[in-house]
């Protein structure tokens, strides 16, 4: 459908019915945009639901000439960008949190070679791409953009691999990330 048809004025003519028509006609396209941007199906669905809930809550109070198709695509894009900004902040402080927790769990008298063995074992348990991304990001100190360029993957994919690697590490041996950073730095 065209922007001229899907306007707030059109939506307000028969709000529940037109909202459902809009949802059914736009959901798939919006979902594909969000999924490709975020590289996560569940998160993409959550973003779409948030956008439509926002429209449902404020649509009646919006100016009538706003083209809803453009509004929805812009809203989805903005929520995806916000999510990536939050990831950058979380990733930046995640390392520091894990490093500080490492001091609590590792006994000081443990030999360095034992630590190295644990670190290497944990790294070997990660899927190849997660391991590569983690090594480039944490051990070599590359930025996500640089990791993405080196591995020829999307920057969002780097975020996803880092997030999954941290989750794995936290659930298995949270304290070892420090040594990924310190030993191999």
Image (cartoon, helix red, strand yellow):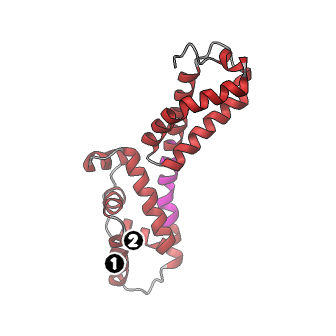
Magenta segment boundaries in residue numbering: 85-98
Indicate left or right for 56 with 152 as reference.
Answer: right
Badge 1: residue crowd in 10 Å (few <14, some 14–19, many ≥20) = some
Can you say whether 2 is above or below 140 in the image? above
Q: Secondary structure at mark 1?
A: helix
Q: Which residue is mark 1?
A: 116
Can you say whether 48 is above or below 137 in the image? above
Q: Which residue is mark 2?
A: 179
Q: Residue 96 colored magenta?
A: yes
Where is residue 49 shown, x and y percent of the image? 61, 40
Q: Residue at x 38, y 73 (%)?
A: 122
Image quarter for residue 128? bottom left
- Secondary structure mostly seen in the magenta stretch: helix
Please name whichever residue, 171 or 118, is drawn nearer the observer in this view of the structure: 171
Where is residue 114 shown, x and y percent of the image? 36, 84
One can see residue 38 in this view: yes
């Amino acid at each position: 459908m065209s922007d001229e048809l899907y306007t707030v004025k059109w939506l307000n003519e028969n709000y529940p019915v037109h909202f459902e028509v809009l949802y059914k006609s736009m959901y798939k396209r919006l979902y594909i945009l969000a999924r490709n941007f975020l590289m996560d199906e569940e998160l993409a669905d959550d973003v779409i639901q948030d956008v439509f809930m926002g429209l449902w809550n404020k649509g009646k109070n919006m100016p009538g000439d706003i083209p809803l198709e453009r509004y929805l695509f812009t809203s989805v894009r903005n929520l995806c960008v916000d999510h990536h900004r939050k990831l950058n902040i979380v990733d930046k402080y995640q390392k520091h949190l894990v490093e500080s927790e490492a001091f609590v769990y590792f006994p000081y008298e443990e030999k360095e070679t034992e630590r190295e063995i644990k670190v290497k074992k944990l790294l070997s348990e990660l899927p190849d791409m997660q391991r590569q991304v983690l090594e480039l990001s944490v051990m070599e100190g590359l930025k996500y953009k640089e990791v993405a360029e080196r591995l020829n993957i999307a920057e969002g994919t780097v975020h996803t691999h880092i997030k999954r690697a941290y989750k794995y590490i936290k659930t298995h041996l949270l304290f070892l990330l420090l040594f990924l950073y310190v030993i191999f730095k």
